[in-house]
Image (tube, rainbow, N blue to C red):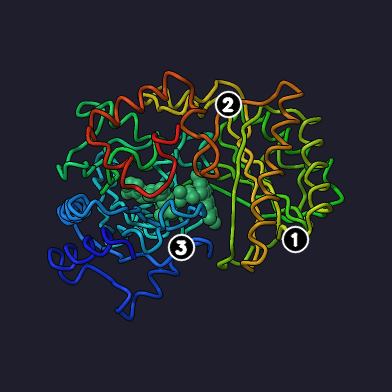
């Protein structure tokens, strides 16, 4: 344990009694093993669990006083090591008890505690006949999802999750609690819509909800049919340009192709663009803790390029069998996503106004001995795909934070102007650079 982390643990334990889990506590193991990826099961010096924004402010003050390293954790679903986890050289601020939920029925604005998981938000809103633009998996935390932009099944119709936020409550490095919205601290509000954990600890997100109106199917396909699947994928992506109600996720695993087809309406018939995607088997993947790494790249649409990337993936599976369950997904982003972002005041992500795909490349494996092969496999899978896209003139700059590796320069990918704006905003709201110096790792401005 580092000296400063020990000092921080002691100060936290005395000033936030009952809110600190140390290695001597029974709960310590379950706190350590909370993250989704086993690679993030690191033994922090302690886990501090504030219940209110004021307690977050106290926790930050103690950490600053001790000059200890720290990480902020919400749903623990970011699989990059040291992003929401830290070893004994630091403290984890665990936000899970900031889980209040309320709704203003007139405006349809929900106030969501920043420690909620999507499961809690959906269940609460459904009681009111509403939903939100959130994660596709119930266990994902609202914190990391929103601060990385947030891609939902219905983002083509409603925009990114972050573009549906009307106000952030934030504890700044000074421990002052502020609101950030279009009228108050508007630069901070803008920066938080994709700018990550660089500016403060967000303690509440106020979000615009929408009505529940959706149909979906989850299908499995034979891998051998990949050329038809990819052609049909492009067809659905093209259909999204004129009808943003379409949503889709296509994922190729080594043994099957798994496709989610969504349509934001109730209809008697299968939406037209889905008709060439008949299911072989309907299935759901079981959720389990594995070791995981992700990488991402964004490209325009091109059937030839999709085919080449697919063949590159097949080659990688053959070449690198130790890299675990290596797979990729094609999350489609229609032009409407960037239009909606602009219409709602903009975000710093620099999304180009073209139909595009934010490819997600991932590998999952069970055993620590496969770590090197797993990391290398997925990194090469992504760099090879980027090379193919580059050669075909289809590569875009954006690296989507929520599916990125921390070795990728997400904030720089937003473009020079946006990157400068993020730097200026961080310098304004955190002049001492607490979130840069003491935060252990992440998609940080200091790494740009
Ligand atoms: C199974 C699975 C499904 C997924 N599905 C989707 C999806 O549908 N759409 C999508 O966009 N992404 C998806 N993701 C990616 C996911 O959104 C990101 O990994 C995200 O970072 C997870 O958020 P979290 O709060 O669970 O993670 P955490 O690991 O707790 O946090 C991630 C990052 O956000 C920071 N952070 C979290 N909360 C706060 C806060 N309140 N204030 C300041 N910083 C904070 C953390 O410090 C860390 O840097 C999925 C991931 C998995 C594993």
Q: Are marks 3 and 2 in contact (CB under 8 Å)?
A: no
Task: Pinpoint residue 308: horizontal percent, then vertical percent.
Answer: 81, 35
Marks 2 and 1 sit apart, C-alpha to C-alpha, by: 30 Å
Marks 3 and 1 sit apart, C-alpha to C-alpha, by: 23 Å
- Residue 136 visible? The answer is no
Q: Which mark is residue 397?
A: 2
Task: Pinpoint residue 426: horizontal percent, then vertical percent.
Answer: 30, 31
Q: Is mark 3 within 8 Å of ligand 1?
A: yes
Residue at 24%, 51% (x, y): give it. Answer: 67
User: Which residue lies most toward the front here?
Assistant: 3
Residue at 29%, 50% (x, y): give it. Answer: 112
Marks 3 and 2 sit apart, C-alpha to C-alpha, by: 29 Å
Residue located beneath label 3 in the image: 35
Instruction: Name the quarter where the N terminus is drawn.
Output: bottom left
* Residue 331: quarter of image: top right
User: Which residue lies most toward the right here?
Assistant: 224
Category of crowding for the residue at label 1, using alpha-carbon neighbours closer than 10 angstroms: few (below 14), some (14–19), many (at least 20): some
Closer mark to the observer between disc 2 and disc 1: 1
Q: In the rendered image of this protein, does residue 42 appear above or below residue 387?
A: below
Residue located beneath label 1 in the image: 322
Left or right placement of residue 124 versus residue 49 in this view: right
Left or right placement of residue 106 versus residue 328 in this view: left
Along the viewing direction, whichever of 57 and 129 lies nearer the viewer: 57
* Residue 301: quarter of image: top right
Q: In the rendered image of this protein, does residue 282 appear above or below residue 183?
A: below
């Amino acid at each position: 344990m580092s000296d400063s982390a020990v000092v921080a643990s002691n100060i936290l334990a005395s000033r936030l009694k009952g809110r600190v889990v140390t290695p001597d506590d029974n709960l310590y193991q379950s706190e350590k093993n909370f993250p989704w990826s086993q690679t993030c099961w690191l033994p922090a010096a302690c886990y501090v669990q504030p219940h209110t924004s004021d307690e977050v402010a106290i926790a930050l003050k103690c950490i600053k006083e001790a000059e200890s390293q720290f990480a902020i954790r919400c749903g623990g679903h970011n699989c990059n090591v040291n992003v929401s986890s830290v070893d004994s050289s630091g403290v984890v601020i665990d936000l899970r008890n900031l889980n209040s939920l309320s709704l203003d029925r007139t405006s349809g604005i929900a106030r969501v505690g920043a420690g909620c998981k999507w499961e809690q938000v959906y269940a609460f809103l459904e009681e009111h006949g509403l939903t939100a633009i959130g994660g596709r998996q119930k266990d994902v935390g609202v914190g990391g999802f929103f601060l990385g932009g947030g891609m939902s099944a219905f983002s083509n119709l409603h925009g990114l999750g972050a573009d549906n936020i009307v106000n952030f409550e934030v504890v700044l490095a000074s421990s002052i609690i502020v609101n950030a919205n279009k009228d108050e601290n508007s630069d901070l509000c803008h920066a938080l819509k994709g700018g990550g954990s660089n500016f403060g600890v967000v303690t509440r997100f106020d979000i615009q909800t929408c009505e529940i109106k959706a149909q979906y199917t989850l299908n499995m396909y034979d891998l051998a049919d990949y050329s038809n699947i990819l052609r049909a994928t492009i067809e659905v992506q093209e259909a999204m340009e004129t009808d943003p109600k379409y949503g889709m996720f296509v994922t190729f695993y080594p043994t099957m192709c798994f496709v989610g087809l969504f349509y934001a309406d109730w209809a008697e018939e299968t939406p037209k663009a889905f008709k060439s995607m008949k299911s072989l088997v309907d299935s759901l993947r079981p959720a389990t803790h594995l070791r995981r790494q992700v990488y991402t790249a964004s490209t325009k649409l091109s059937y030839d390029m999709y085919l080449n990337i697919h063949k590159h993936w097949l080659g990688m599976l053959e070449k690198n069998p130790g890299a675990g369950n290596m797979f990729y997904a094609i999350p489609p982003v229609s032009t409407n996503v960037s239009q909606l972002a602009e219409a709602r005041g903009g975000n710093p992500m620099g999304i180009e106004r073209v139909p595009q795909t934010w490819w997600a490349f991932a590998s999952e494996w069970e055993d620590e001995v496969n770590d090197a092969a797993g990391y290398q496999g997925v990194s090469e899978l992504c760099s090879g795909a980027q090379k193919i896209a580059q050669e075909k003139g289809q590569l875009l700059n954006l690296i989507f934070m929520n599916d990125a590796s921390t070795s990728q320069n997400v904030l720089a990918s937003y473009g020079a102007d946006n990157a400068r704006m993020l730097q200026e905003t961080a310098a304004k709201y955190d002049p001492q650079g607490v979130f840069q110096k003491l935060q252990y790792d992440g998609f940080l401005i200091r790494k740009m």
